[in-house]
Image (tube, grey):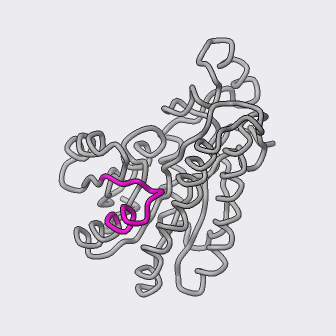
C-alpha cells in the first residue's frame, strides 16, 4: 500500500494509460478522482471501484472546467497529494504543413495548455502544504519523433521541458515533478498514431521496439506509482522512458 493516505487526480483517467494509473493507485491505497471529458465513462469506472474513486467531467483545455475539477477534488478529499496530467490527443499522421489549424489548436490545448491550467489551479495548494507530486504523461515522441506526427511530437517535447522547469522551480516547496514517456500502446489513440490499424502497420511499429510489444496501461500504472510514491522522494525532473527500449 505505497499510496495509503494519499489523494490523487488522474486526468484522462477513464481509459487507456490513465485507467491503468487509476487502477494501480487505488490498489496501492490512494483515493482517486477519475477526471475525464467522457463523464459517463468516468462515472462507470468510479462505480466499479467503490468509495475510494470519484468521477469528474473535465475539459483540460478549458480554465473554468479545470478550476471546477480542482475545487471538487479539494472539497472531496480535503487535500491533494498527486496530480497526473495524463489526458492527451493527437492528430492523424500527415505532413506538417497539412495539419489543420483546428487540429493543431486541439493538440496544443489538450497536451500543452492543460499542464499550465492544472498547475495554476493546484500548485498553490501544494506549495502551501509544502508537499506534492505531479506526473506528466509525455511520450517517446518527445524524445525520438516519428515522421508525420509532427505537432504531436512537439507538444510532448514541450511537456518534457515543462516537467524539468516545474521540477527545478517547485523543489524548494517540497513538490516533485516527473514525466513518463510511453511508447504506443493498446489505447484509443493507437489507431490515430498509426493512421490505420492493420497487422502490417502494427508489425512496422513493433519492429522499432526492442522488447517487441506495445506499452500497456499496467506498465504506466507501475511506473506512475513509483514516481508518485515516497519511494521516489529523491527523484524530480526525470522523464522516464517506459518504452521497451524504443529510444535507445
Q: How many marks?
A: 0
Measuring 60% from the left and 41% from the top, which residue is drawn there?
Answer: 103
Residue 63 lies within the magenta run: yes
Which quadrant would the N terminus be assigned to in this image? bottom left
| Residue at the extreme top | 199
Measuring 75% from the left and 34% from the top, which residue is drawn there?
Answer: 148
Decide if residue 104 is on the left or right side of residue 17.
Answer: right
Decide if residue 137 is on the left or right side of residue 152.
Answer: left
Measuring 42% from the left and 87% from the top, which residue is drawn there?
Answer: 128
**Vertical order, 219 against 177 (above or below):** above
Decide if residue 236 is on the left or right side of residue 54.
Answer: right
x, y (%) of residue 217?
48, 39
**Vertical order, 1 against 118 (above or below):** above
x, y (%) of residue 230?
48, 69
Q: 181 or 222: which is nearer to us?
A: 181
x, y (%) of residue 215?
58, 35
Which quadrant would the C terminus be assigned to in this image? top right
Residue 87 lies within the magenta run: no
x, y (%) of residue 232?
56, 67
Decide if residue 218 is on the left or right side of residue 165.
Answer: left
Looking at the rendering, which quadrant does residue 30 occupy?
Answer: bottom left
Looking at the rendering, which quadrant does residue 159 occupy?
Answer: bottom right
Q: 87 or 61: which is nearer to us?
A: 61
Measuring 63% from the left and 70% from the top, which residue is drawn there?
Answer: 236
Q: Which residues are magenta?
A: 57-69
Amino acid at each position: 500500500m505505497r499510496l495509503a493516505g494519499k489523494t490523487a487526480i488522474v486526468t484522462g483517467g477513464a481509459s487507456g494509460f490513465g485507467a491503468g494509473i487509476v487502477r494501480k493507485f487505488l490498489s496501492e491505497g490512494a483515493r482517486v478522482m477519475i477526471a475525464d471529458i467522457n463523464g459517463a465513462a468516468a462515472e462507470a469506472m468510479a462505480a466499479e471501484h467503490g468509495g475510494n474513486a470519484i468521477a469528474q467531467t473535465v475539459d483540460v483545455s478549458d480554465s473554468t472546467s479545470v478550476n471546477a475539477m480542482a475545487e471538487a477534488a479539494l472539497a472531496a478529499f480535503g487535500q491533494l497529494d498527486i496530480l497526473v496530467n495524463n489526458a492527451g490527443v493527437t492528430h492523424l499522421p500527415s505532413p506538417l504543413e497539412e495539419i489543420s489549424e483546428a487540429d493543431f489548436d486541439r493538440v496544443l490545448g489538450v497536451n500543452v495548455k492543460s499542464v499550465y491550467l492544472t498547475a495554476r489551479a493546484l500548485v498553490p495548494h501544494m506549495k502551501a502544504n509544502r508537499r506534492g507530486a505531479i506526473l506528466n504523461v509525455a511520450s517517446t515522441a518527445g524524445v525520438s519523433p516519428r515522421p508525420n506526427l509532427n505537432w504531436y511530437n512537439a507538444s510532448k517535447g514541450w511537456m518534457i521541458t515543462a516537467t524539468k522547469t516545474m521540477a527545478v522551480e517547485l523543489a524548494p516547496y517540497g513538490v516533485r515533478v516527473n514525466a513518463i514517456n510511453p511508447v504506443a500502446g493498446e489505447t484509443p489513440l493507437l489507431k490515430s498514431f498509426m493512421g490505420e490499424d492493420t497487422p502490417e502497420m502494427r508489425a512496422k511499429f513493433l519492429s522499432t521496439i526492442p522488447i517487441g510489444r506495445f506499452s500497456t496501461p499496467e506498465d504506466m500504472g507501475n511506473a506512475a506509482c513509483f514516481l508518485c510514491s515516497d519511494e521516489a522522494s529523491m527523484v524530480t525532473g526525470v522523464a522516464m522512458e517506459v518504452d521497451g527500449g524504443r529510444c535507445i
